[in-house]
Image: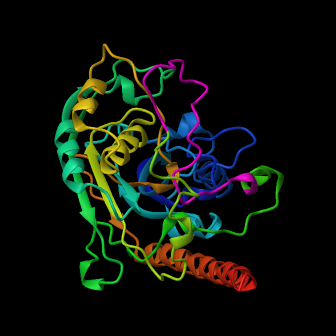
């Protein structure tokens, strides 16, 4: 038997997270079902099946990793042909018997903001504050069982992307992405089997709403949730230009060996507060004090992408055919979304005309 590691790309919109759960459509559940049906694995224990990270519902990925033992030679395109379009294996690498994907050298996450009035200077100051080793207890899920909440952030970068300038689209790590693809607009025709029965109930939002406290957060003091200056229907709503063909996002890239559950999304809420001038950077210093208690609401999962996971002495070989197939799926679904956007925008324009 040989052990192999596979790099997985998926659009998280129609999944209930990565980790398999009963009666929910998950990325891991789809992968295990497909690998078993094709005879690559029999049971999870014997195959030493392992995963690198459990992304939340709605989070996307270019670089999550699974590994398993198999007596068969793994054929990437055979597996992809049997997977749903919103999951694809894009790379593989042979690994040693003792390899465990959860122990990575570095993980790279990206959060996407679509705001055009952020205080970048203050946000850059915030990146310097978060970098290095800190106790992130106030940026973690309170009920998680962690031996320690101390983590090290190697780097945070604020990156500007111009969708209208093709020359600015640069490869990210060893995965060359097309920046015109908007992952939060993904739409898929769902399987109507019992296994996927709840996936159509996923309510997707492009804005920062749903700012309610998590039931698992037991602390009521120092709650950080709602923004004063932003909302789905704020005072500038009438001025939103739905005819724009593209948007110029700001990327926040975070690099580190490991992260706590909800850690990045809670950090991103603070980045948004500081960027909107609703919080001073000095206040954030207090949040990194483990003796103080803050209840920080995680920001939307749909804007978060697991970009890449790297390991010592392991080089993944990307499959060109799989890569192009995944891009084609994104483009097709983006086209469907734009058709829907055009129709609904026409209805909106007609409603405005009725008042004339």
Looking at the picture, does residue 320 appear above or below residue 262? below
Which colouring convention does the figure follow?
rainbow
Q: Is residue 337 above or below residue 251?
A: below
Q: Point out residue 283 in the picture as x, y percentages from the top left corner.
A: 27, 30
Residue 47: x and y in percent read 53, 41
Which region of the structure is painted magenta? Answer: 200-225
Residue 220 in the image: state x and y as whole percent: 51, 20
The image shows a total of numbered marks equal to 0
Give whichever of 185, 74 is nearer the camera. 185
Q: On the image, which quarter does residue 83 sit in?
A: bottom right
Outermost residue toward the front? Answer: 356
Asked if residue 75 can be seen in this view, the reply is no
Task: Tell which of 192 and 57 is nearer to you.
Answer: 57
> Does the magenta run of residues contain 215?
yes
Q: 5 or 108, which is in the foreground?
A: 108
The structure residue drawn at horizontal position 67% and vertical position 38%, both measured from the top left corner, is 21
- Residue appearing at x 26%, y 54% in the figure: 119
Residue shown at the point (25%, 42%) measured from the top left = 105
Q: Is residue 138 above or below residue 333?
A: above
Of the 4 image quadrants, the one containing the C terminus is: bottom right
Q: Nearer the viewer, residue 76 or 283?
A: 283
* Residue shown at the point (38%, 25%) measured from the top left: 138
Whether residue 133 sits left or right of residue 337 in the image: it is left
């Amino acid at each position: 038997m040989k052990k192999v590691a596979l790099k997985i790309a998926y659009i998280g919109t129609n999944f209930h997270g990565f980790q398999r759960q009963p009666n929910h459509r998950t990325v891991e559940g789809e992968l295990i079902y497909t690998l078993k049906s094709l005879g690559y694995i029999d049971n999870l224990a014997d195959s030493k099946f392992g995963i690198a990270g459990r992304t939340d519902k709605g989070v996307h990925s270019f670089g999550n990793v699974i590994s398993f033992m198999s007596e068969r030679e793994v054929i990437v395109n055979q597996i992809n042909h049997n997977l749903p379009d919103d999951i694809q294996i894009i790379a593989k690498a042979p690994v040693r018997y003792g390899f465990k994907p959860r122990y990575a050298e570095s993980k790279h996450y990206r959060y996407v903001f679509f705001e055009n009035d952020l205080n970048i200077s203050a946000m850059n100051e915030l990146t310097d504050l978060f970098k290095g080793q800190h106790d992130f207890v106030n940026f973690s899920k309170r009920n998680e069982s962690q031996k320690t909440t101390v983590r090290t952030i190697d780097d945070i970068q604020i990156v500007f992307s111009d969708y209208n300038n093709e020359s600015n689209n640069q490869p990210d790590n060893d995965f060359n992405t097309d920046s015109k693809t908007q992952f939060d607009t993904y739409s898929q025709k769902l399987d109507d089997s019992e296994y996927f029965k709840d996936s159509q109930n996923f309510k997707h939002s492009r804005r920062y709403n749903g700012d309610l406290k998590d039931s698992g957060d037991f602390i009521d003091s120092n709650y950080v949730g709602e923004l004063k200056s932003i909302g789905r229907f704020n005072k500038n709503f009438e001025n939103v230009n739905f005819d724009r063909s593209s948007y110029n996002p700001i990327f926040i890239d975070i690099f580190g060996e490991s992260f706590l559950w909800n850690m990045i999304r809670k950090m991103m809420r603070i980045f948004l507060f500081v960027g909107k001038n609703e919080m001073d950077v000095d206040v954030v210093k207090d949040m990194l004090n483990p003796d103080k208690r803050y209840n920080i609401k995680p920001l939307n999962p749909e804007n978060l992408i697991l970009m890449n996971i790297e390991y010592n002495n392991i080089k993944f070989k990307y499959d060109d055919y799989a890569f192009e197939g995944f891009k084609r799926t994104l483009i097709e679904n983006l086209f469907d979304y734009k058709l829907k956007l055009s129709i609904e925008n026409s209805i909106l324009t007609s409603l405005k005309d009725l008042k004339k």
